[in-house]
Amino acid sequence: MKARSLKQDKVNIITLGCSKNMVDSEVLSGQLKANEIDVVHENKKLDHNIVVINTCGFIDKAKEESINTILDQLELKRRGKLDKVYVTGCLSERYREDLAKEIADVDAWFGTMELPLILKQFNADYKKELLGERLLSTPRHYAYMKISEGCNRTCSFCAIPLMRGQHISKPIETLVAEAESLVQKGVKEVMLIAQELTYYGLDIYKKRELPKLLHALADVKGLEWIRLHYAYPAKFPLEIIDAIKERENICNYLDMPLQHASDNVLKAMRRNITRAEMSNLIHSIREKIPNICLRTTLIAGYPGETEKDVAELKEFLQEHRFDRVGIFTYSHEENTGAYAVEDNIPQQEKEARAQEVMEVQQEISYEKNQEKIGKTFKVLIDKKEAGRYLGRTEFDSVEVDNEVVIHSTKKLPIGEFVQVKITKAFDYDIEGEVVS
């Protein structure tokens, strides 16, 4: 331990949970680096002496993973492999007092908005001039860009406002400068993230300004793909779709979590929208852009959900044939609106319902992928793995969506675009060959 303390500190940041957490970790890394502190993400070499764990507290599984990660790192500290273990992020924000009592060996706990306090632990200054500067943990050709923090929605199942606070938009000029900085680093694709994209601008501009932001970002030279994640369907501004249609470098892609399709469940969830209104919105979007990729996220096993509600959800999927679907099982979260209601569906039944829904989607996905055979797409090469290249079309986001598998004897540059003709299609992936 004495010998280690003579060395310069090296900080390893472990990020759990969503892409919003990833951005926070990248910003922390950028600040530490600017203060001449050695910092890495998810260090495999284990040559660091300090760990910062950026936790997730969204649902039970995420909380369990966060706790296990903290305990694993504390075991390394007990064995003399680490000097300090710091914990930040959503779990820490939500349960800091209880956790500090239960896990006393953690050196300090921080909330989601306490970056300056974390830096103080390293005798580092928060450098305001670095606004938007980050040390990317993603491959250099794509990055997530957080356009706002927090959420003003009151969905009964969601604990995010408890951990992230009220909605705060970043100014358009700040985001444009951040995008320009990312492009200079080699980024070709940005994924716009927020707890709720469509609310963007209401707090600082007094009106929804996501379309204006999209046009401003589309003007950034060198930014080839702009992708939209997490748009709330109620009172959805169709001007967003107009912006996607008008600008070539905005992907024909929209991630719009609907959560359910039964009016009974939607009302209980406080989603402020009906099945009919969601159907009308989907038709309006596809009328403007017929080939748009629509991704949604659903919840199975919400308290009081019946088999009839599940049947309605499956009907809705078959009717609208979403390109991409993800599903969570309901997690009973303290201090949310639904917490007062009995969590009356066993976990095994929740998982069975989720599987039932995904089997419907699996068939839809297979059929939609089959339609791509023989067609040629612009594909961004993400990586080479097991002797083959893996990439994505504009209709696929990182990690959550399909991949394009490319067999090529020629070397393909990672982070560049190629034209790929699709030759095979499966449930969730497609294969193709490069065409000149």
Image: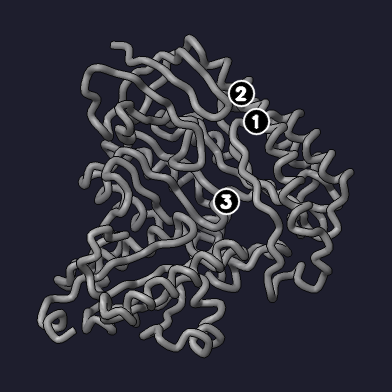
Relative image position of residue 398 (x, y in whole percent):
43, 41
Q: Quadrant of residue 29?
A: bottom left
Q: Secondary structure at mark 3?
A: helix
Mark 1 → mark 3, Cα distance in angstroms: 29 Å
Query: Quick one: 124 or 65, which is closer to the camera?
Result: 65
User: Residue type at mark 1?
Assistant: Gln
Q: Quadrant of residue 114?
A: bottom left
User: Residue type at mark 2?
Assistant: Tyr
**What residue sits 76% from the left and 45% below the top?**
353
| Among numbered discs 1 and 3, the one appearing first in the sequence | 3
* Number of other residues with Cα within 10 Å of mark 1, as a class: few under 14, some 14 to 19, many 20 or more: some
Q: Looking at the image, is mark 3 or mark 2 nearer the viewer?
A: 2
In this rendering, is residue 145 above or below 189? below
Mark 2 lies on residue:
366
In the image, which disc is placed on residue 45?
Answer: none
Residue lying furthest front: 79
In the picture, measured across the screen, residue 254 lies left or right of residue 222, that is: right
| Among numbered discs 3 and 2, the one appearing first in the sequence | 3
Q: Looking at the image, is mark 1 or mark 3 nearer the viewer?
A: 1
Mark 1 lies on residue:
362
